[in-house]
Amino acid sequence: MQRQRWGIVLPILLVGVGLLIAAALNGLGARFDFLYRNVGGFSALQTLSRGVLGLSALAWLGAAGLLAGRMALQPAPWPRKIMLILPAYFLALLLLGLLMFLFHIGTTGPFAALWTGISAVLALVGVVFSAFGQRIGGRLRAIVQGLLGVSGGGVFLGGLAFLLSFILAMARGPAPVFAGRDRPFGEGAFPGAPAGAFRAPPGTFEGGPRAFPPGARPEGGFPFSPGPEGRSLPFRFFPSASTMAIGGGVLIALGILAGAAWLWGRRGAAGLGEAIATAPISDWRREGLRALAGGGGLTLALLLIAQLIPAPRTNPPVRTVVQWDPPEAQVLWQRACADCHSNETRWPWYTAIAPASWLVVNHVNEGRQAFNLSEMDLSQLPAARKARLAEEIAQVIRNGTMPPEDYLLMHPEARLSALERELLIQSFQEMLAR
Ligand code: HEC
């Protein structure tokens, strides 16, 4: 009997861990896409790996959903019923996190990533318990095993493509010039990259030749940005290609282990066949309604607890005032940017309620940290900083990164027309050229 159980528990655990590792590796993927854009086949293999791992994740979620959903439908008196609901509840939180990524909600800061990461770990633990805590047989077992087989194979193949892409990359080396962002990067930014790889020959930038003061350490920007003020990932923590390749190897190993456990569990179950019947659920409707009620109660309780974690909404004194030219630019600025890049933030009622407050306060704080027109006297900035800010502003407005999409959902009036965008950009450029 134990073998039947472990035959499901082990694959779902191993594949789940593999998918978590894959998600973490993928979080760094975009940067590597750029670094190795000269390596033929690198991005194709990366795309393949992401696609296969995505399918694997879907299959895993399917199996997990069946197990957790069935657990939530088990009859039990109240306190225990809540325990039985938890795995499905965590899975629902995880799905919500994935939806946030799909719709770009909370992706400007760490909100969506933290939400998804934490709920993924909780869901994994919950699902392992739900695989362990119930007898699964017959058709349900066949379906769950089928899905787990697919997702285990996906982790193996996705890991293989991932590993191969980095072996290729290490053999060929990084692209010699960072033309995309028309500025070079510091030596030693990438461990293992050949010296000089990051020094662009003069005049080779897409944006035209550009002078840098000798010895200046370029401050970056996407995709290697330590941020204007050195906020995000410092260069020295950036993993090397070989670390990423090892990650691919770990995925392969987990895929193989999961496959072995899967076969072992299947062979064990084959002999017993129909003998391992799933414990029947007598009243689906009633138990379903109770599960929903339990989930609702849990949500209310969590929301109440969440309010205890404060996210202070601040509007520090305004120290600098900008002379806008033309005046219409100021209106655009207030409509689209001022909430996050000044100390004159409007705080709608929902920004007082967690978890929305966490997201919004984080946006505002990070936005102010990036640049804050209430606290910086633009005319006093060094010339290089002015030029860079003007360029960054033009870029983020044109490519639609700013204002962030989730902000636009709640503030449709902040959407700028093409004409308005150019007006705002131009006004900034003139202001920063003074
Ligand atoms: C919902 C809040 C919000 C609004 C509205 C907003 N920003 Fe931002 N902005 C941010 C955050 C958060 C960051 C920091 C992003 C990061 O670190 O990745 C940022 C960063 C920036 C940066 C620095 C970009 C970089 O490369 O680090 C610029 C420039 C910028 N915003 C311009 C604008 C402009 C112009 C507008 C109006 C059209 C605007 N923002 C509207 C939140 C906002």
Image: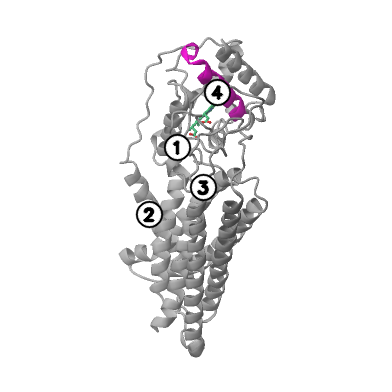
**What is the x, y in percent for residue 132?**
39, 73
Say whether residue 283 is visible. no
Q: Which callout, 4 or 1, points to the residue nearer the camera?
A: 4
Residue receiving disc 4: 212
Q: Which callout, 3 or 4, points to the residue nearer the camera?
A: 4
Mark 3 vs 4, N-terminal side: 3
Residue receiving disc 3: 28
- Tell me which segment is drawn in magenta: 378-397
Q: Quadrant of the C terminus?
A: top right
**What is the x, y in percent for residue 377?**
46, 13
**What is the x, y in percent for residue 205?**
65, 30
Mark 3 vs 2, N-terminal side: 3
**Badge 1 residue CB within 8 Å of ligand 1:** yes
Q: Residue 191: which numbered mark, if any?
A: none
Q: Residue at x 48, y 67 (%)?
A: 254
Helix, strand or loop for disc 2: helix
- Give the prevailing secondary structure in the magenta stretch: helix
State the CA–CA distance, disc 2 to disc 1. 38 Å
Alpha-carbon neighbours of circle 4 within 10 Å: few (<14), some, or many (≥20)? few
